[in-house]
Amino acid sequence: MEVYKGLVNTIETFGSVDGPGVRFVIFLQGCKMRCKYCHNPETWAPKCDEAKEWTPQDMFNYAYRYHFYWGKDMSNGGITVSGGEPLLQIDFVIELFKIAKANGVHTAIDTTGQTFSQDDGYLEKLDKLMEVTDLFIVDLKAFDKDLHRSLTGVDNTNILEFMKYLSKSGKKMWIRRVLVPNLTDGEEDLINTRKFIESLETVEKVEVLPYHTLGLFKWQKLKINYPLDGYRSPTKDEVLRANTLLNTEKYK
């Protein structure tokens, strides 16, 4: 039996914003998007010196050491795989989550869905992943294709199709939107995003994430030009406006 190894950049043992409850968060290496406000640019490259290979079993064994944080019946937390783009290492995630579900652990994946394809081989693997994934946390950068391309370097057509596929398959979703004043706060795009979200049937939560520069030091360390120099974090009123336009209250 083939053992799929995952290339892991970093690990967070006590995450509180990457799914329900307390999460053991695994940040995988590799991403094809180049989001202008990315707070993990060190995960972009397919490989890096800091990343470490793990087998699914070894990764689970390490994560399970922290299961006491998840409650006596493990109903208050679990394992989240993030990145980078975790779907680039889908075989590893499938095997890791199979082990997790066999041990009663809640599983979540934080993804953009950018790898989605209608190819039969891809869908076969995605279906296997869905069988062992309790929650998909999807980052929807923008609804407008041109805006999305400007923000990330790629089109969002397959990302929207990915979310439709999850909904059709009955998979629970949380949807996130990063709010950058004068960039991702346009009324038309927020309204169109809301309409698209409302067309989906399995969305449990919609979150507005205020833009911040806490990851700026990583760009500087990597000597990458930061494209949002001069942009600011949104005010409380701006966040409230975005929440209203997206109708996030509907999902609370």
Image (cartoon, grey):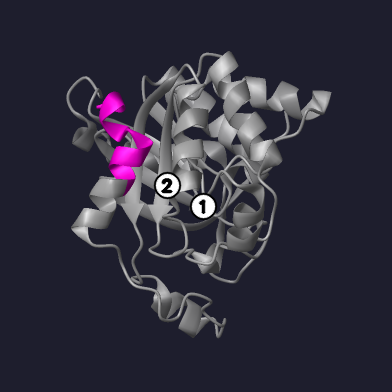
Q: Is residue 58 left or right of residue 129?
A: left
Which label was assigned to residue 181? none
Q: Quadrant of residue 62?
A: top left
Does residue 193 belong to the magenta stretch? Answer: no
* SS type, badge 1: loop
Work out whether residue 109 can be spotted: no
What residue is drawn where x is 37% and y is 37%?
246
Does residue 245 belong to the magenta stretch? Answer: yes
Residue holding disc 2: 177
Label 1 crowd (10 A; few <14 / some 14-19 / many >=20) = many
Asked if 67 appears above or below 7 in the picture, the reply is above
Depth order, front residue of 146/1: 146
Label 2 crowd (10 A; few <14 / some 14-19 / many >=20) = many
Labels 2 and 1: the sequence-earlier one: 1
The magenta segment = 242-252
Which label was assigned to residue 83? 1
Depth order, front residue of 233/112: 233
Asked if 109 appears above or below 38 in the picture, the reply is above
What residue is drawn where x is 27% and y is 56%?
238
Where is residue 17 shown, x and y percent of the image? 29, 45
Q: Nearer the viewer, mark 2 or mark 1?
A: 2
Magenta span: helix, strand or loop, mainly? helix
What residue is drawn where x is 53% and y is 24%?
98
Please name the amino acid that badge 1 sits on.
Gly
Depth order, front residue of 243/188: 188
C-alpha gap between disc 2 and disc 1: 17 Å
What residue is drawn where x is 41% and y is 76%?
216
Depth order, front residue of 241/232: 241
Q: Is residue 148 left or right of residue 189?
A: right
Pick the quarter of the image with the C terminus.
top left
Please name the amino acid that badge 2 sits on.
Arg
Pick the quarter of the image with the N terminus.
top right
